[in-house]
Image (spheres, rainbow, N blue to C red):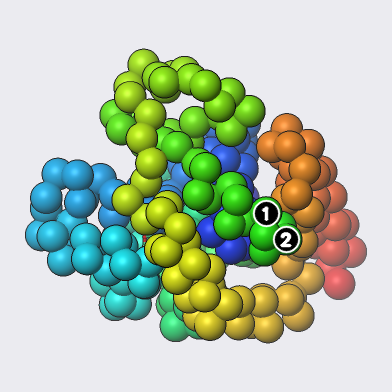
Amino acid sequence: MRVVIIGPPGAGKSTQAERLARERNLPRISTGDVLREAIKTSTPLGLKAKPTVEQGQLVDDATMIAIVRDRLRQPDTVRGFVLDGFPRTRAQAEALDAIVAERDNGPLIVVNIVVPHDELARRLTTRRICSRCGADADPFDGDAARCKRCGGELIQRIDDNAETVRKRLKVYEQETRPLLDYYSPRPTFHVVNGAYPPERVAEEVAATLDSAAARARFRQSHQC
Ligand code: AMP
């Protein structure tokens, strides 16, 4: 199963992608995590991407496409993958189609998580992540000082301050929302309401994917 989770910043893509990947035993590939790790360890990629990420802008397409192309050529992605944070531009989406076409093992299933704009800004500016493992803290556990998983200190992401959040939401509208026109005509495009608590959204994502898989099997067996 090859799944792409798209949606605006704060929609809950990482939470859902992580859960889905765990439940279906697939690798989760988060381009945001790749960049944050590179920034944390000051690799050449991290040094190059840091100002862009801090300003809430998008890292250039060529860099991001190369990262994802390399990752999707790893053997653990043969059974499938869950992509989180990529694609974010039309050029990235077209490149992803070309990469996926190299291996003919099923369609790309696109799940778009939708959440009202005001709620996105609220979630992002109050969100905290673990400084050690990078996991999002449970938003319903507001007083926790430490990560539930590894005990690391909880901090605000470098790009979750109010000004950068405004910029990221604007960049989403300009650069990433147009992807909906690219993907929505496909029968493998699905919309999930992300305004509910994560467990309920996860149930909807799972149900959506299961019925998509059942429909694909039906189409295949009837060759239509
Ligand atoms: P995320 O964790 O997905 O919200 O990503 C955090 C930041 O990393 C974004 O605001 C961008 O600066 C950068 N980034 C992550 N994925 C991409 C991508 N596919 N294209 C360009 N920039 C990206």
Q: Name the quarter where the C terminus is drawn.
A: bottom right
Q: Between 48 and 84, which is closer to the camera in this rendering? A: 48
Residue 192 visible to the viewer:
yes
Query: Label 1 amino acid?
Result: Glu
**Category of crowding for the residue at label 1, using alpha-carbon neighbours closer than 10 angstroms: few (below 14), some (14–19), many (at least 20):** few
Q: Position of residue 30 (x, y in %)?
A: 42, 51
Numbered label tally? 2
Residue displayed at 45% across by 58% down? 162
Q: Contact (CB < 8 A) between labels 1 and 2?
A: yes
Q: Between 107 and 96, which is closer to the camera in this rendering? A: 96
On screen, residue 100 above or below 160: below
Residue displayed at 77% across by 55% down? 192
Outermost residue, front direction?
A: 162
Residue displayed at 38% across by 41% down? 156
Q: Position of residue 38 (x, y in %)?
A: 21, 50
Query: Label 2 amino acid?
Result: Pro
Residue displayed at 67% across by 54% down? 119
Quarter of the figure with residue 197: top right
Q: Quadrant of ligand 1?
A: bottom left
Question: The residue tagged with tag 2: helix, strand or loop?
Answer: loop
Quarter of the figure with residue 180: bottom right
Q: Position of residue 52 (x, y in %)?
A: 27, 68
**Dot label at residue 116:** 2
Cβ at disc 1 under 8 Å from ligand 1: no
Q: Is residue 192 left or right of residue 48?
A: right
Q: Is residue 75 left or right of residue 211?
A: left
**Label 1 to label 2, Cα distance in Å?**
6 Å
Q: Report the residue marked by disc 1.
A: 119
On screen, residue 217 above or below 137: below
